[in-house]
Amino acid sequence: MLPWRPAHALDADGAHALIDRSLAEVYQVINSGQPAPQMYQQFEAIFARYADVDVIARSALGPAARQTDPATFAEYRQAFQGYIGRKYGARFREFIGSRIEVTGSRQLKSFYAVTSVAYLNGRAPLEVEWHVSDRSGQDLYFNIIIEGVNMLASERAEIGAMLARRQGDVAALAADLRQAG
């Protein structure tokens, strides 16, 4: 008898395809010529569609995520999603006229690492690794490592510092995140 497997299980091809679809949407927005605020809204929507926002927001908030009531966490999560859309959306604008090529994917522990190379105008190529999992019930990425810089770790440090400046007040952090990025 074969071991039980879910109807859909993430594999290397599925992880690769997820990143390909996500990047295709990002480039569609980048090359649209829209004003920055509209682009940021679309980047936020792409992030919400392809990233495990809940896992990333919880990780960035750290231990405070377990102590925060569900309503406050939901407010923080929504504010964090917009913050990431604006913050990384501003960086994506640097990609106008460039390309990112997905080069492979491999299993690491309980997730897949999808490797890619970003070819930016006038700069050396950058290695970008995407971590993809189906633990939430969908194939979603939960981390990006750009030239060795771990997005989860960077956001955890940044959000942690912002939370400390607000004496641990997650609601105040959420209010500030709506303006940040």
Image (tube, helix red, strand yellow):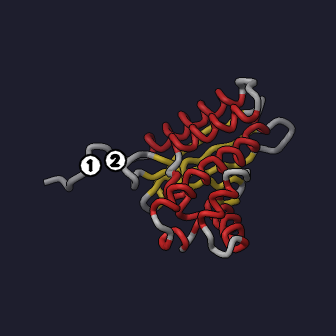
- What type is the residue that disc 1 sits on? Pro
- Name the residue at the top extreme: 32
Element under disc 1? loop
Q: Quadrant of residue 14?
A: top left
Estimate the x, y position of residue 146 in percent, counting from the top left.
69, 53
Q: Is residue 129 above or below residue 118?
A: below
> Badge 2 is on which residue?
9
Residues packed near mark 1 inside 10 Å, few (<14), some (14 to 19) or many (20 plus)? few
- Mark 2 to mark 1 CA distance (whole Å): 6 Å
Which of the labelled discs sits on residue 6, or is there none?
A: 1
Where the N terminus falls, by quadrant?
Answer: bottom left
Task: Find out whether the residues at labels 2 and 1 contact each other: C-beta distance under 8 Å.
Answer: yes
Q: Foreground residue, 84 or 126?
A: 84
For the point 51% across and 40% down, the residue is 49
Estimate the x, y position of residue 12 in percent, counting from the top left.
45, 45
- What type is the residue that disc 2 sits on? Ala
